């Protein structure tokens, strides 16, 4: 996918941040849309269908966490990459963001060039999806369609946030194999993305709620595996 075809939605209530970040991203050749609160972000996202959404957390009218949850409920936006850009770096805020369906977390202040670099790293995942060869994974009553980012359990479709989907897809590629935490972080989040140690645990807990607790086994001190 060419840069000129990639759409990015930037959401922040600080006008100077919108101007600086949108200028730097536009200079790279991306299509950039902006919004100043969660309600406006949802409306813009529905219309533009962005590939990447950069959300501030603390905003008037509707904060980023709630906006993220509502965006993830929109089928056309389920494949969008969502990252938070915020000055709040506390663990509880990050966990809340991931539980709402975010894929990543970037902490302010950040230099524009560094932010552009992180955006490029996030957008590489779009290329990875395009080059994926294992489009369909079938394990018992579970069917994973990696091209369409859809799963079905006993014939019923279940919509998962991007990171939950990628984590499930990874574990399901080799049922019974124990994936070490380091390997999961590398393959699902990438070497260039720094996430907290609790991130995997949060996503596994969400998958257990949706797919079934017995499908995932914790190997203490090592990692996780998918149980067929």
Image: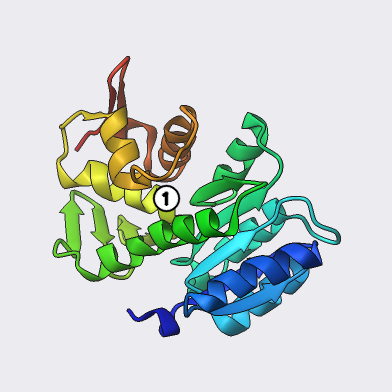
Find the residue positioned furthest to the right: 61
**Crowding at mark 1 (Cα within 10 Å: few <14, some 14-19, many 20+):** many
Where, quadrant-wise, is the N terminus in this rendering?
bottom left
Q: Position of 175 compared to 224: left or right?
A: left
Q: Which residue is more in the foreground, 211 or 19?
A: 19
Find the residue positioned furthest to the top: 221
Q: In this view, does 34 lie above or below 220?
A: below
Q: What element carries label 1?
A: helix
Q: Which residue is more in the foreground, 134 or 137?
A: 134
Q: Mark 1 points at which residue?
A: 163
Residue 153, given in percent of the width and then of the height, sits at 32, 54
Q: Is residue 48 above or below residue 128?
A: below
Residue, x 67% and y 32% (percent of image)?
90
Residue 128, given in percent of the width and then of the height, sits at 26, 63
Residue, x 66% and y 78% (percent of image)?
44
Residue 188, given in percent of the width and then of the height, sits at 33, 46
Where, quadrant-wise, is the C terminus in this rendering?
top left
Q: Quadrant of residue 9?
A: bottom right
Q: Can residue 47 be seen in this view?
A: yes
Q: Position of 188 compared to 108: left or right?
A: left
Q: Which residue is more in the foreground, 36 or 205?
A: 36
Residue 215, given in percent of the width and then of the height, sits at 30, 36
């Amino acid at each position: 996918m060419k840069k000129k075809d990639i759409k990015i939605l930037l959401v922040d209530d600080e006008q100077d941040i919108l101007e600086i970040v949108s200028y730097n991203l536009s200079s790279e050749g991306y299509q950039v849309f902006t919004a100043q609160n969660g309600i406006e972000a949802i409306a813009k996202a529905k219309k533009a269908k962005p590939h990447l959404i950069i959300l501030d957390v603390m905003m008037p009218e509707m904060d980023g966490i709630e906006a993220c949850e509502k965006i993830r409920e929109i089928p056309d936006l389920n494949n969008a990459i969502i990252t938070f850009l915020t000055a709040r770096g506390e663990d509880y805020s990050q966990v809340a963001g991931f539980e709402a369906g975010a894929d990543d977390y970037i902490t302010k202040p950040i230099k524009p060039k560094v932010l552009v670099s992180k955006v490029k790293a996030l957008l590489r995942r779009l290329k990875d999806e395009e080059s994926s060869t294992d489009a369909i994974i079938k394990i018992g009553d579970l069917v994973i369609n990696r091209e369409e980012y859809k799963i079905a359990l006993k014939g019923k479709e279940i919509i998962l946030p991007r990171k939950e989907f990628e984590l499930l897809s990874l574990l399901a590629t080799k049922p019974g194999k124990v994936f070490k935490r380091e390997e999961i972080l590398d393959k699902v989040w990438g070497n260039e993305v720094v996430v907290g140690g609790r991130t995997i645990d949060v996503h596994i807990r969400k998958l257990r709620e949706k797919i079934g607790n017995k499908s995932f086994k914790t190997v203490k001190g090592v990692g996780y595996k998918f149980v067929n």
